[in-house]
Amino acid sequence: MIRLGALCRELGLELRGDDSGLEVRGVAEPAAAGPHDIAPLTDPRRLGEAAHSCAGALLVMEPLPDDPRPQILCDDASAALGKLLTALAPETAPPGEGVDPRAAVDGTAMVEEGAW
């Protein structure tokens, strides 16, 4: 996890409100977000979902003055969301070489000539 303030500084995003050291785990839809998630509310038709979300912080295009949570303000929602998702994505190891020992092929399987 990373502190919200540090994440915003690292990504060049504007943070409004007191993050109080909020540690962020990921990005999630408002209805599924938990206290360590950022919920994107960049579609004006979905702003009402903020009241029912448990998100620790919100990604918004306009400030929500009645919401006390930290808010990340952005002009370009797609770019901001992309930055957040990339920064918060878990590191994965590249797949190993060779054949997985759990691999199985049906005995009746055939490979067409010219397939590769």
Image (tube, rainbow, N blue to C red):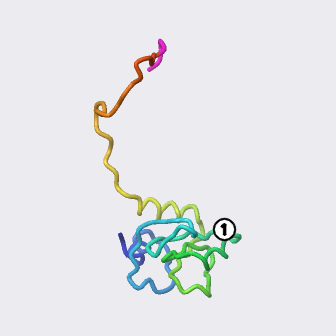
**Going 41% across and 62% down the picture, which residue do you hit?**
87
Q: Amino acid at mark 1?
A: Asp
- Nearest to the observer: residue 12 or residue 38: 38
Q: Which region is colored magenta?
A: 112-116
Q: Looking at the picture, tell me which residue is in the foreground, 94 or 83.
A: 94
The x and y percentages for residue 104 are: 36, 28
Q: Is residue 63 magenta?
A: no
Q: Residue at x 44, y 68 (%)?
A: 11
Residue drawn at x 47%, y 14% is: 114
Quadrant of the frame with the N terminus: bottom left
What is the secondary structure assignment of the residue under circle 1? loop
Q: Is residue 113 magenta?
A: yes
Residue 73 image offset from top left, x and y in percent: 56, 75
Q: Quadrant of residue 90?
A: bottom left
Q: Residue furthest right?
A: 45
Q: Which residue is mark 1?
A: 43
